Amino acid sequence: MKFIIAGLGSFGSSLGMALTSQGHEVIAIDSSMQKVETYKEVITHTICMDATDEYTVNGLPIKDTDIVVVAIGEDQGANVMATALFKTLKARRLISRSINPLHEKVLQAIGVDDIFHPEKEAAMRWAKRLSLRYFVDSFELSDNFSIVEISIPTDLIGRTIGELQLEHRFSIKLLSTMRYEHYEDSFGRMQTKPNIQGLASPEQVLQDNDVLVIYGANEHINKFLRSVGVKAR
């Protein structure tokens, strides 16, 4: 897929690097040459330009791009202007960053396809991660259903997935297991990446260091967590 990301702040740069590492083509733009130079080796394309300037932005391959992300978070005015400009230039799918509730209403009025709140979403994930002993990460599909990653509780090590009877007892499904591996990035820093073990099978034996990827209703997931001694919310 092809992406345009406007804004190379903390979120925009992280998103650009992640998408590039997954094999997508990313054009990241920012008015700071320093930021453009910093990320030119780890993001497909980085361009120094003003995302609010219609003449320069019009030169981008917007019609050939699958998703445009306005990740500007420091300047609310620039965020609104860039979002409105990409909307005018008929971006196929336009996603913009919300800075505050009033700003979100302006974005809704512009007609963006989606709005994200990186600080709020990160805070919610960390709240879960800090409050649940085994919690690793989660993705909420709706208010009631989630996919969660849980470090394997000690009581489950050595047992097969089939004998847990998760679907029968808790109405949840174990989609897969994975392990996090360490590697050194291009800046020489140690990072972790997930190594997915494939689709879960009934005969698979759960091992130490496994991370369980579970899907289901939040109340059912919490019931399962309580059953293995995890204090759920």
Image: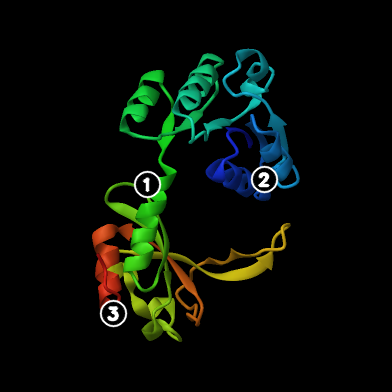
Ranked by sequence position, the earlier of labels 2 and 3 is: 2
Secondary element under disc 1, as helix, strand or loop, is helix
From the viewer's perspective, tell me whether residue 116 is left or right of residue 57: left
Give the amino acid at mark 3.
Answer: Gly
From the viewer's perspective, tell me whether residue 190 is left or right of residue 127: right
Determine the CA span between mark 3 and mark 1. Answer: 28 Å
* Image label count: 3
Mark 2 Cα shell of 10 Å, populated few (<14), some (14-19), many (≥20): some
Choose top left, top right, bottom left or bottom right for residue 46.
Answer: top right
Q: Which residue has dot 1 on it? A: 120
Give the amino acid at mark 1.
Answer: Lys
Q: Position of residue 120 (x, y in %)?
A: 37, 47
Mark seen at residue 227: none
Mark 3 Cα shell of 10 Å, populated few (<14), some (14-19), many (≥20): few
Q: Quadrant of the N terminus?
A: top right
Q: Position of residue 135 (x, y in %)?
A: 39, 68
Give the amino acid at mark 2.
Answer: Thr
Q: Residue at x 72, y 63 (%)?
A: 188
From the viewer's perspective, tell me whether residue 30 is left or right of residue 157: right
Marks 3 and 2: in contact by CB < 8 Å? no
Determine the CA span between mark 2 and mark 3. Answer: 39 Å
Choose top left, top right, bottom left or bottom right for residue 2.
Answer: top right
Q: Is residue 158 above or below residue 6?
A: below
Q: Residue at x 67, y 17 (%)?
A: 56
Q: Position of residue 119 (x, y in %)?
A: 41, 46
Mark seen at residue 20: 2
Q: Which residue has dot 3 on it? A: 229
- Residue nearer the viewer, 62 or 202: 62
The nearer-to-camera label among 2 and 1 is 1
Q: Quadrant of the C terminus?
A: bottom left
- Residue nearer the viewer, 175 or 229: 229
